[in-house]
Amino acid sequence: MSADFQAPRGIPDYFPPDSADFRAVRDTLTEAARLAGYGHIELPVFEDTALFARGVGESTDVVSKEMYTFADRGDRSVTLRPEGTAGVMRAVIQHGLDRGQLPVKLCYSGPFFRYEKPQTGRYRQLQQVGVEAIGVDDPALDAEVIAISDEGYRRLGLSGFRLEITSLGDDETRPRYREALQEFLFGLDLDEPTRQRAQLNPLRVLDDKRPEIKEATAGAPLLIDYLSDDSRAHFDAVLGHLDRLGVPYVRNPRLVRGLDYYTKTTFEFVHDGLGAQSGIGGGGRYDGLMRQLGGKQDLSGIGFGLGVDRTLLALRAEEVASRGIERVAVFGVPLGADAKTELVTLAGRLRAVGIAVDLAYGDRGLKGAMKAADRSGARLALVLGDRELAERTIDVKDLRTGEQQQLPLDTIVDDIRRLLV
Ligand code: HAM
């Protein structure tokens, strides 16, 4: 029988037991940021379409092909957020967060939306953990942001990834490089749309996935050879910090990111166990974004977005043991109506002191209920029947050793606490 409804194409569901791993990945990556002083920001799921068009760039695939854009009932054009950086910058400008201590350090997590062709590791609703540090142009801050990502992945037990890094230069670098690149591209035999792209945004042509374009542009000039003195010094300083922090990296002067706001330090974490969708996270500096979005100040920024879905796939590819075990500690097995009433109350008291408890609902009898207790992964089963209830006792079974003991019902909360340590 086919169900009437399915989730929209390319939109994953997260449910037990795998959702526990999902949460562990998200929380571990977030924890790495928290340890470096990033405060939580909860962003709107949709914003003005113009924010992304201007912030991310009209000529990017994300804006030109992948946005979920619609008119709301007031006929305003809004877009489901395809990424988090533009929204964070909007919030910083709107609420004057940059008037306080700098850098403003913020961390977020949640779903983002891109109308891409779905495949393994590429979803239309994707989950990211991101950080942004706004207001200080210091190579040490770039290194911090990169080290947090590296630390987050390592805490999860991931090892088969590499950090690719380059510099995209600054306002002085870009025009010089753009000119050299355009000169090269216009010398090639390109189709009309690609030629137009070369005119509008030549860097994007280097991001073209078609093999014939890749081949044709293999000998293109490299931006890294056109860096201004300031960008060069900044980049060298970032790499120096990473060396001292023990964060391994490979320079990839051909690294091109899919968003237009990047300047100077730009990086991507790549995992080879994932096939085509190998980017498990990425980020970089975006020193012109605040100005671009109409901020009164012109503050620099740096951040990352780590893909939770792809990190999860990478962990599976490496067969790293699941860490996200979301199980109850105690499972109640009531035998009879009065026992159930007692256990429902007891479960509430145990939860109130922080112990995770589940019960066998639905009056299944001892055998079925004990099976449910085993499946729950709980350490202790509490079996209560009419006779024990009359005697104010309860049977406590250790589900790992099989040992059973009878304990007084009236002091059971303290006894269970003691047994669980
Ligand atoms: P991004 O590289 O577009 O950067 O996305 C970051 C990560 O999100 C990717 O490395 C990938 O792991 C994951 N991701 C992207 N698209 C998909 C998809 N369709 N399905 C599954 N996972 C996906 C940004 O979004 C920037 N806002 C990052 C940033 C923050 N830069 C500076 N600050």
Image: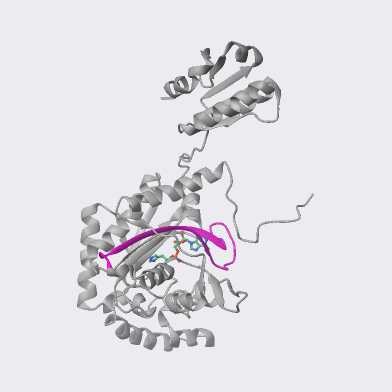
Q: In which quarter of the view is residue 391 placed?
A: top right
- Residue 50 in the magenta stretch? The answer is no
Give me the residue at 50% from left, 51% from top. Answer: 313
At which x and y percent is residue 244?
A: 20, 54
**Is residue 416 shown above or below 193?**
above
At which x and y percent is residue 12?
A: 59, 55
At which x and y percent is residue 264?
A: 30, 72
Give me the residue at 35% from left, 60% from top. Answer: 106
Q: In which quarter of the view is residue 395 placed?
A: top right
Give me the residue at 61% from left, 18% from top. Answer: 384
Residue 396 visible in the displayed image: yes
* Count of marks placed on residues: 0
User: Looking at the image, what colour scheme do you see?
Assistant: one colour
- Residue 125 in the magenta stretch? The answer is yes
Ligand 1 shows up in the quarter that is bottom left
Give me the residue at 33% from left, 77% from top. Answer: 288
Residue range corresponding to the magenta coloring: 100-129
**Is residue 190 shown above or below 345?**
below
Q: Residue furthest right?
A: 1
At which x and y percent is residue 74?
A: 60, 77
Is residue 278 left or right of 16 when viewed as pictured?
Answer: left
| Viewer-proximal residue among 91 and 238 | 91
Residue 370 visible in the displayed image: no
